[in-house]
Amino acid sequence: MNARLRRLGGLLTAVWLCFDPTAASSAEAPTDSSETRRAHALFESHWEETARLYPEWATFRGDHRFGDRLTDASPGGLAERDAYWRSLQQRVKSLDVGQLSAIDRVSVELLLYQTEENLLFQQFDGFRTMTVSAASFAFQSQLAGILRANPVSTAVQVEQMLARMAAYPHRVEQEIARLRQGMAAGWVPPRAALERVLTQLDAQLANPPEHSAFFEPFKHLGSGIDAAEQERLRARGARAISDHVLPAQRKLRAFVAGDYLAAAPADGALSSYPSGDRVYAALVRTHTTTALTPPQIHAIGLKEVARLRSEMEALMRSTGFTGDFVAFIKYLNTDPKFFHDSADALLAGYRDIAKRIDPELPRLFAELPRATYGIRALPAFMGPGAAETYDGPSLDGTRPGWFNANAVGYKIRPKWSMATLVAHEAVPGHHLQGARAAEMKGLPAFRRDAFFTAYGEGWALYAETLGTELGLYSDPYSRFGFLQAQMLRAARLVVDTGIHALGWTRQQAIDYMIERTGLDPEQMKSEVDRYISWPAQALAYMVGQMKIIELRDRARAALGDRFDIRRFHMVVLDSGPVPLDVLERLVDEWIAAQKAGAPH
């Protein structure tokens, strides 16, 4: 996959123009040429077709034409999507990239990258069936997430949502059939992950309809809907949950607790599944967008863990604490002064930190996105150990970005860890990057909405390192929180590769995470189950951050006094999400242009 992409590298001349995507020079290629029109038509048709094939994705993007539907998971539906990606690859390859502008050449490269990634995993259908798991996006929690994203400003939009809820039982039937297919091929998640699935399902089923996570959108109906109609829609929502959603979740739970759990292995290492080593190698390439091997990544992790542990112990000594590291960790995780006393207080604390960051951002960024963001609680059924998440703004500008904080976990979320989380999930992390990409109108829509794990999570982890310049980490405890968050991502390199490629057990991974990071044991169990359920994803954070820091240092060394951190950050952000090798080329082109005297 990467070798074929590198052959396109020579085509990327004058690519520094991409950093103002509205200003690409018409001198490099005629923008109204037939090949340009063909490429743009392909970009647009791809955007349209993915909305139809993946209606939930369309909703998250802000396209609500298919808001009454769910993805067709039948054999026919899956075959149609697979065939689409194969056809798309051939159409992308047929483009004469030499006739295209720099921006369009990058767009072709990225679309080819995405098609090859999709085709790569078509050969691993057993792996694709493992959709219920400990991962945050797993099937058992998807409906609550999509209902949160459904607009409810008008009665028509609410009717769409009700239709989606009515379609859910059939969707669950399709998913159970897929799970059975995977089970027959020897692909079932491990017992520990499925036990987390059952815990989540039990929490979803515990409350009556009006108090369930599925009812949340009905509490926020648009003011344009009159009061009487709102009451009718809420009553219909409660009935839909009672008649459709909860029975479907009970059926899913019965299957998972029965046949599926009985077939679950004790060990979730990919190396124990049919062709699992090939699957893991593909996942490592996909998530890191590099050619790094699992042993190489493991070694990088061990080195970073050692470096960070040294810094953490030095900081501990600077506080005057007289005990050892274990005692210091116990102190930080048990003293009541380090914790909020309620979920609401935790959310208020996050919001206060965000308000302090916002006015400092112009010091590090030449331009900022217009889209706003909010901070809200994760659905309670995810449990106190679940990791925080971020939902990006819709491309149509009607929905803000959301940092989803684990409010029910307030007893194990110390105050000194909170600033780092805001920097990662909100600003200058995921929200700033995602919202900026969404607003780059000179890029094709599929690029504005793209996500490459190493780029997106690498940027968010890099954003944590900017905290000091934004006024964060001003006391030793919050600074320790920053180092601990970095340690978590470094330890992931060791543990993820250890589990899936080097023979580590789940308990060995849990023990390592607890000892190295000092984080709450229940949270670390949840983290390890996430790595088992979502192989290689956790590798992308530190790999991506290290590449961005490398490129920043390269640019500073090359440009000297001409280096501007605000402009460098815009270079990284303004071509939208890209693989790391593409990002490196773009930064190198920018450095060359700056050295040649190009204006900022």
Image: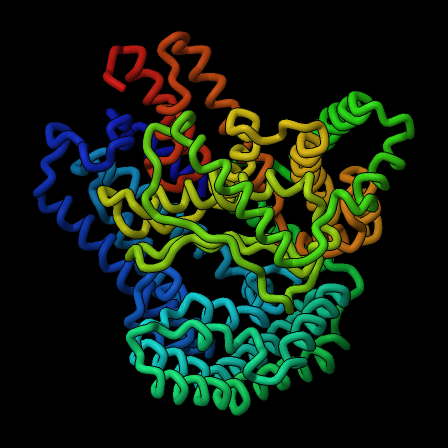
Residue at image location 39% in from the left, 11% down from the top = 559
Q: Nearer the viewer, residue 364 or 275?
A: 364
Residue at image location 53% in from the left, 58% down from the top = 376
Residue at image location 58% in from the left, 79% down from the top = 211
Residue 377 picture location, percent across and down: 57, 60
Residue at image location 31% in from the left, 79% down from the top = 225
Residue 469 picture location, percent across and down: 52, 25
Quarter in which the N terminus is drawn: top left
| Number of marks drawn | 0
**In the rendered image, which quarter is residue 386 located in?**
bottom right
Q: Nearer the viewer, residue 516 or 330?
A: 330
Residue 392 picture location, percent across and down: 42, 53
Q: Nearer the viewer, residue 563 or 257?
A: 563
Residue that lies at the very extreme toward the right in this rendered image: 323
Q: Nearer the viewer, residue 28 or 383?
A: 383
Give the side of residue 437 with respect to residue 234, left or right.
left
Give the side of residue 201 with respect to residue 511, left or right.
left
Quarter in which the C terminus is drawn: top left
Give the side of residue 558 with respect to residue 321, left or right.
left
Task: Reply above or below: 289 against 552.
Answer: below
Task: Reply above or below: 26 against 155.
Answer: above
**In the rendered image, which quarter is residue 24 located in?**
top left
Give the side of residue 501 with respect to residue 33, left or right.
right
Task: Reply above or below: 185 against 334.
Answer: below
Task: Reply above or below: 299 against 251.
Answer: above
Q: Please say whether residue 40 is visible from this viewpoint.
A: yes
Q: Which colouring convention does the figure follow?
A: rainbow
Q: Please say whether residue 504 is visible from this viewpoint.
A: no
Residue 458 picture location, percent across and down: 52, 37
